[in-house]
Image: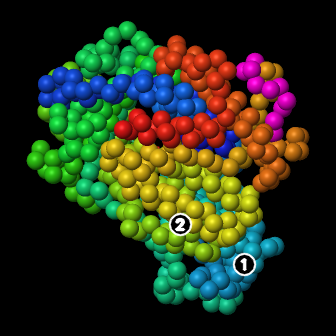
Amino acid sequence: MSTNGLRALEAISPKLLHSFYEAGDYQLAFNHHHEETGELVKSFDMQPMCAAQRAAGALPPLKMRWWYITRALEEALPEGMLHFGHKLVECVDLMGPQGQAASSAVGAAGSGAAESNSATYRYELSFRHSGPGATASSAAEGTEAGMTTATTTVVAKWLIGADGGFSRVRRTVRKGAMNGLLFMWVGLEVAAVGDGRAPAFLGTFSWWGSATESQLAAAGADWPLPLRGPPQPLTRNATYMPPANRLSTTGSRNLLTFRNPPCDLRATRDGGEGCREDVALWYMEAQAEAMEAEGVDASPEGPLLRHAADDGGAVALARALRMASHLPPDVRAFMAATPPHRVLEKALHCHPLDQQQHASWTNGRGMVLVGDAVHTSGRPDGQGGNLAFEDAAELAAHVRRHGLGQQAFDAFAAARLPRVTAIRGDCKPPFAVRKALVDGSAFEPLWGPQDLPSAQELEELGLEPERPGPAGESSGHSSSSAGTVSEEQRQRVLAWSLRRCWQIADRRTGGLLGAPPAAGAALVPQQAQQEGQVAAASVRA
Ligand SMILES: Cc1cc2nc3c(=O)[nH]c(=O)nc-3n(C[C@H](O)[C@H](O)[C@H](O)COP(=O)(O)OP(=O)(O)OC[C@H]3O[C@@H](n4cnc5c(N)ncnc54)[C@H](O)[C@@H]3O)c2cc1C
């Protein structure tokens, strides 16, 4: 996670961000090893940068496990908001591009919920799901292995597509036409809900796997040599690339390995597998030419997810191991010990930058896209998730300002298009454009009273005990409207949040992140942000 994603989360809820620092991982060195001999080529020590960040009032660096992020976000939502196992299979714009005939179309489509207020519902979404979750509006379709498969249809006034790189919302192009009282398809092309674009194959495949320390031991394997040794509170890593490569993953093939310490799961509802011991993670990329040279099929056709547990993780693991034949024996043995069901293979796809237009984000008819659905870069370049968090914070701020509707979606798209394009467009070290934009991130606070510190917490941190917060203390997020948080309150909350983050990070790492600031040196965030940019510029220099 980088500053922009962390700041966006903080804008949504500082306490949510603090829970991430409680559960996340911390890494202070990035080690580049020779891909054939395993010798250390270069070690990048991030401790001075971390100390500079601290002195400048920036947030501590943080690594998160993806499963934890999704779980923490799920748990932060009100009960019953999420419906798991429901796959969107159809998405129809009931009004079409001209926006007429909504009422009869919705009624004839048979959505009971829409009939009472049909003119206002624009989209009809069909979700396929299994199990006993069928509702009155669900049509049972069949039985598979004792489970009922059903389709539930819902209607919506406004549609936010957050369904990832292969967004169904974005890709849906329906043929059809409205015809008075009847809603029937007559084979005419009607505007897509989105711009209809699917991401393009990047010519690169990726694999990733994970194993607990005991799974490695059970398979008779050990960590790669650089990751061996007693447990440590920090994440250790070893990257295997040609010696001439920079510390980036842009070569014809590369492997990243990590040894993560146990993850603190107190904040989660149901814990997680294998996080009470060290966990091995590895990620490998190979370009199609390198695969063809090894005789490994690299055809561009086929789905994003090529091989997973369903069709035998063993296939993915075997293909990964063939691409790992040049690596040192300790590394190959480590990879081979990964339980096959914990290995995935993906063909990398991206939405090309030259296809980023206002119309890619919103169709002007009540639909907006966020995250990978609109701007996936395909390769994990450290920004996809961060930009998705930015999207969430920004969209919420625009909706609060303009109300839920097309005006908010247009303002959101207009603000996001240049920023996302600039960050994504600067994708090679030293990331001068990207770094300045990321480090200088600031988002409008969306806090509710439940996100704010108690007077006692403020006192403990040496901050003024007066409880900051938006007007209307007893209400939640929804009542906090733009302008209710004064600049002074905002600064105080950010100062509190910054201190909390460093306090947690110091506790989690035994104080290894860098020298703490001198007593009383708490910076106000605005000043800190300016100084952070200066510090970032000097680090780049
Ligand atoms: C190996 C790897 C490492 C990465 N590392 C980083 C990193 O270090 N930093 C970073 O910022 N980013 C990283 N990324 C990128 C990051 O994971 C993505 O950019 C981010 O997940 C995008 O979030 P999203 O919510 O837009 O999409 P997703 O996370 O893809 O979520 C989309 C959701 O929609 C659901 N969905 C999709 N289709 C349907 C349908 N038809 N019906 C119902 N539901 C549907 C999916 O199940 C999923 O839950 C990495 C990615 C990978 C693969």
Identify the image quadrant of residue 376: bottom left
Q: Secondary structure at mark 2?
A: helix
Q: Residues within 10 Å of mark 1 (few under 14, many from 20)?
A: many
List x then y, in percent, for residue 354: 38, 67
Q: Name the residue that disc number 2 marks.
A: 361
Mark 1 falls on what kind of element? helix
What crowding class fits label 2: few (fewer than 14 Cα within 10 Å), some (14-19), or many (20 or more)? many
Q: Quadrant of the C terminus?
A: top left
Q: Which residues are magenta?
A: 460-469
The picture places residue 118, in percent across and down from the top left corner, at 76, 76
Q: Which residue is mark 1?
A: 107
Q: For the residues marked 2 and 1, what is the alpha-carbon distance in whole angstroms?
A: 29 Å
Disc marking residue 515: none
Would you identify the image quadrant in which residue 44 lies? top left
Of all residues, the one furthest to the top in this rendering is: 230
Question: Would you place residue 274 above or below residue 532 in this image?
Answer: above
* Image location of residue 256, percent across then percent down: 30, 33
Q: From the viewer's perspective, is residue 378 above or below residue 230? A: below
Q: Is residue 488 magenta?
A: no
Q: Left or right: 538 with respect to 247?
A: right
Check residue 465 for magenta coloring. yes
The picture places residue 332, in percent across and down from the top left corner, at 21, 27
* Residue 197 against residue 203 in the figure, above or below: below
Direction from residue 214 to residue 15 in the image, left or right: right
Drawn side of residue 38 relative to residue 90, left or right: left
Tell me the kind of residue under disc 2. Trp
Which one is earlier in the sequence, the residue at label 2 or at label 1? 1
Which residue shows up at 76% across the image and 25% down it? 463
Whether residue 61 is visible to the viewer of this picture, yes or no, is yes
Q: Is residue 335 at least partly visible in the picture?
A: no
Instruction: Between label 2 and label 1, give the one nearer the viewer.
Output: 2
Tell me the quarter of the picture where residue 518 sits.
top right
